[in-house]
Image: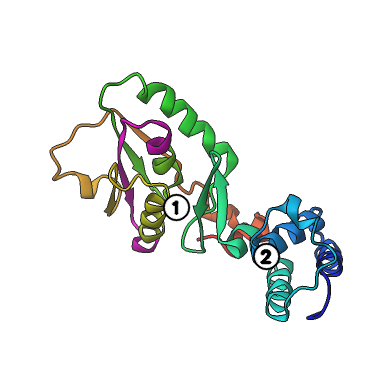
Amino acid sequence: MGSMTVDALLREGARLLTEVGHERGRLEADLIMSHLLKTSRAHLYLRLGESVPSKKARAFCSFIEKRRTGVPLSYILKTQEFMGLSFEVNPKVLIPRPETELIVEEALGFLKKREEPWVIDMGTGSGAVAISLAVFCSKVKVAAVDLSQSALGVARENAHRHKVSGRVFFYEGDLFEPLLSLEQTYDGIVSNPPYIPSATISSLDRGVKDFEP
């Protein structure tokens, strides 16, 4: 497949994904190729006749194979959109879900009415909620807490990416423990922690149960 055109690779990738039950096989193949060629999906269709460099063709095949085994597309592309923003994600953090945007929208409605609001994001993970609050409410400050040092590393990178590092403060620890010594009062708490009972994990989609932390 190394000397194939964009179009031929996309067709083959879509076939391989559809073959194992991915209903959006062509879309996912398009997104993987767009990521590798650093172009938009729309512009990709202007390049269908181009030959793909062998290194990128091999990477495309590798990513398609990972997706066939159930690895979430967000982990393959190392990014997930949330609130219209792009967040780095990897297997150290849960993938932000669209429905979690409702938490941010509700919190923003409350926080924008406060003069100098402080809020706690408990179990921040990738930092998607905390950082979105800071991006869309320029006066808010957020204490983002997580038990995982690895997750906090991802969250810090995302805060830097969106230029809110000066208003999102990260704390490692169990729930409120790292905040107890701080002389700070808060206007609210937001949280979207892992909430799936251990007994039901085996019944979940493979992408969740086998790959998310």
Residue to which mark 2 is pinned: 37
- The residue lying toward the viewer, choosing from 49 and 97, is 49
| Residue 58 placement, left or right of 12 | left
Q: Where is residue 52 in the image (x, y as percent from the top left)?
A: 76, 73
Q: Position of residue 8 (x, y in %)?
A: 86, 69
Residue to which mark 1 is pinned: 126
Q: Position of residue 204 (x, y in %)?
A: 65, 54
- The residue lying toward the viewer, choosing from 19 and 89, is 89
Residue type highlighted by circle 2: Leu
| Residue 198 placement, left or right of 59 | left
The residue mark sitting in front, 1 or 2, is 2
- The residue lying toward the viewer, choosing from 68 and 59, is 59
**Residue visible at 35% across and 32% down?**
138
Local crowd at mark 2 within 10 Å, few (<14), some, or many (≥20)?
Answer: some
| Residue 14 placement, left or right of 194 | right
In the rendered image, residue 54 lying in the magenta stretch gets the answer no
**Residue visible at 54% across and 52% down?**
95
For marks 1 and 2, give the CA distance. Answer: 25 Å
Local crowd at mark 1 within 10 Å, few (<14), some, or many (≥20)?
Answer: many
Local secondary structure at mark 1: loop
The magenta segment is: 133-150
**Residue visible at 51% across and 62% down?**
90
> Against 124, is 114 above or below?
above
Cβ–Cβ under 8 Å for marks 1 and 2: no
Quadrant showing the N terminus: bottom right
Q: In which quarter of the image is residue 112?
A: top left
In the rendered image, residue 143 lying in the magenta stretch gets the answer yes
Mark before the other along the chain sequence, 1 or 2: 2
> Against 75, is 170 above or below?
above
Residue type highlighted by circle 1: Ser
Q: In which quarter of the image is residue 186?
A: top left
Q: Which mark is residue 69?
A: none
